[in-house]
């Protein structure tokens, strides 16, 4: 048995005792899908699915377009940096805004801004670009929208489903996200063969539907305190909360530094063109590989959530991520590279799942947006800043050495974090507030 599930209580109906193991697993799986009966949750999933699909398609087109125009791996890093700088400046403010105002409206506005960015990229492509700097400006605006969308979206899920079903909702939402990451890069890579303008036009259309779906969501009325003005004390509440919870601090710190040094995905356009020689369609396949591994683990988690040895699972997942980064960096065969990326995604998903439950379930709703914003800073730093770090090290040491060194650094960070956060390493179950809500 891969994951531990809370056992059925001794007072369960006597008929349950006669169930076979397969029937019991099927019943639990169907019980987890009950959240799909909630209309607002379905609309949220649809909006996020289409928006993430659009983002993944856009990422493939931007990466290939930029690298084709300049041939410089540093520019691939600048793609991440352009999104990270406005993100890190605004995300803490965004977390307090998410706690003070209607999260549905905020998320819809974010999708609208991302729609505007897609239209700007479309106009840029139609004009026959020769300079990549306008792309970085557009991506900065995109990063600003993500700064508000990420904590808002994370904080919304638990408002849409019963608390006892939140673990299932997280797994289903993660599955939808990774479905978009699987399909988006492939679709974007294939459509890019017809030109980047085709990709950006479809991206814009997907964002339009996401806005409409989000506006159709119905949330409970926010409390009166939601109208309090933004203040430094309010902004710092999320930081103080994270600092006071060693298990949360350890989990997100581990993710920050591990993915920061192991950001091989930023170099995929260069690998696809210069190492594996597989073109934009092949690039799309490489970008979807981590999502395939992550989606498989998401489905397993939806059926059998992790209930024991939580710390070991988290550190093990990050170690697998680092090891497979090294394999990917050394690979010169497309099939092996694809498999390595898929296993990377599987390892990362375990860590992401544990961290998300720790952050969301144990956090009061009144500050959930701000705590999600702190979590988003760590995620944004590890992803976008990690892309910039990968571009810089690729310029300094060369493409392949930079990825291999990143994987080694991830393994060293994992070992260091196990020593720095012994309570996280020894964590057997989720904290009481989170663990109790996972029970069916």
Image (cartoon, rainbow, N blue to C red):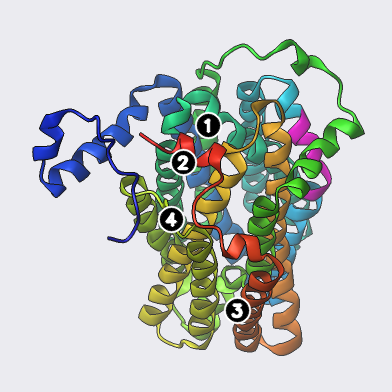
Q: CA distance from mark 3 to mark 2?
A: 27 Å
| Sequence-first disc among 3 and 4 | 4
Judge the density around disc 2: few (<14), some (14-19), many (≥20) Cα neighbours within 10 Å.
many
Q: Earlier in the sequence, mark 2 or mark 4?
A: 2
Mark 4 and mark 1 in contact? Answer it, CB < 8 Å.
Answer: no
Q: Position of residue 125 (x, y in %)?
A: 63, 53
Within the image, what quadrant is residue 402 found in? bottom right
**Residue 112 falls in image quadrant:** top right
Cα–Cα gap, marks 4 and 1: 24 Å
Provide the residue designation for mark 1.
157
Q: Residue at x 58, y 46 (%)?
A: 358
Q: Secondary structure at mark 2?
A: helix
Name which of mark 4 and mark 1 comes first in the sequence. 1
Which secondary structure is most common in the magenta stretch? helix
Instruction: Name which residue lies at 8% across and 39% down.
Output: 18
Magenta span covers which residues? 88-96
Q: Which mark is residue 411?
A: 3
Among numbered discs 1 and 3, the one appearing first in the sequence: 1
Rendered image quadrant of residue 267: bottom right
Residue topped by disc 4: 308
Whether residue 128 is visible: no
**For the residues bearing labels 1 and 3, Cβ distance under 8 angstroms:** no
């Amino acid at each position: 048995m891969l994951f531990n599930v809370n056992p059925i209580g001794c007072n369960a109906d006597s008929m349950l005792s006669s169930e076979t193991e397969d029937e019991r697993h099927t019943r639990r799986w169907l019980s987890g899908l009950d959240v799909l009966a909630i209309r607002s949750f379905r609309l949220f999933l649809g909006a996020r699915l289409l928006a993430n699909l659009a983002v993944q398609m856009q990422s493939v087109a931007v990466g290939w377009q930029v690298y084709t125009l300049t041939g410089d791996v540093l520019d691939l890093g600048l793609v991440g940096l352009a999104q990270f700088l406005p993100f890190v400046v605004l995300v803490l403010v965004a977390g307090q805004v998410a706690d003070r105002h209607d999260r549905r409206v905020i998320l819809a506005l974010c999708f609208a801004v991302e729609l505007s960015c897609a239209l700007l990229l479309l106009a840029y492509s139609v004009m026959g670009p020769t300079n990549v700097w306008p792309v970085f400006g557009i991506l900065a605006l995109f990063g600003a929208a993500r700064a508000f969308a990420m904590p808002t979206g994370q904080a919304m899920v638990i408002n849409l489903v019963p608390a006892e079903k939140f673990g299932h909702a997280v797994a289903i939402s993660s599955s939808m996200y990774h479905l978009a990451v699987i399909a988006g890069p492939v679709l974007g890579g294939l459509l890019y063969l017809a030109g980047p303008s085709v990709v950006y036009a479809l991206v814009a259309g997907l964002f339009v539907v996401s806005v409409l779906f989000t506006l159709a969501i119905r949330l409970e009325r926010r409390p009166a305190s939601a109208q309090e003005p933004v203040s430094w004390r309010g902004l710092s509440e999320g930081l103080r909360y994270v600092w006071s919870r060693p298990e949360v601090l350890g989990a997100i710190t581990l993710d920050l530094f591990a993915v920061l040094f192991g950001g091989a995905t930023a170099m995929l356009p260069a690998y696809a063109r210069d190492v594996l020689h597989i073109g934009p369609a092949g690039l799309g396949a490489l970008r979807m590989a981590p999502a395939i591994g992550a989606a498989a683990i998401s489905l397993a988690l939806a059926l059998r959530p992790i209930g024991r040895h939580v710390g070991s699972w988290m550190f093990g997942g990050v170690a697998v991520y680092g090891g497979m980064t090294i394999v990917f960096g050394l690979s010169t065969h497309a099939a092996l590279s694809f498999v390595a990326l898929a296993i990377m995604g599987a390892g990362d998903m375990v860590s992401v799942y544990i961290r998300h439950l720790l952050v969301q379930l144990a956090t009061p709703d009144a500050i959930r947006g701000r705590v999600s914003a702190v979590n988003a800073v760590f995620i944004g730093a590890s992803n976008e800043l990690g892309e910039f770090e990968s571009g810089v090290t690729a310029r300094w040491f060369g493409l392949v050495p930079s990825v291999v060194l990143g994987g080694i650094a991830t393994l060293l960070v994992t070992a260091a974090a196990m020593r720095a956060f012994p309570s996280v390493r020894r964590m057997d179950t989720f904290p009481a507030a989170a663990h109790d809500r996972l029970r069916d």
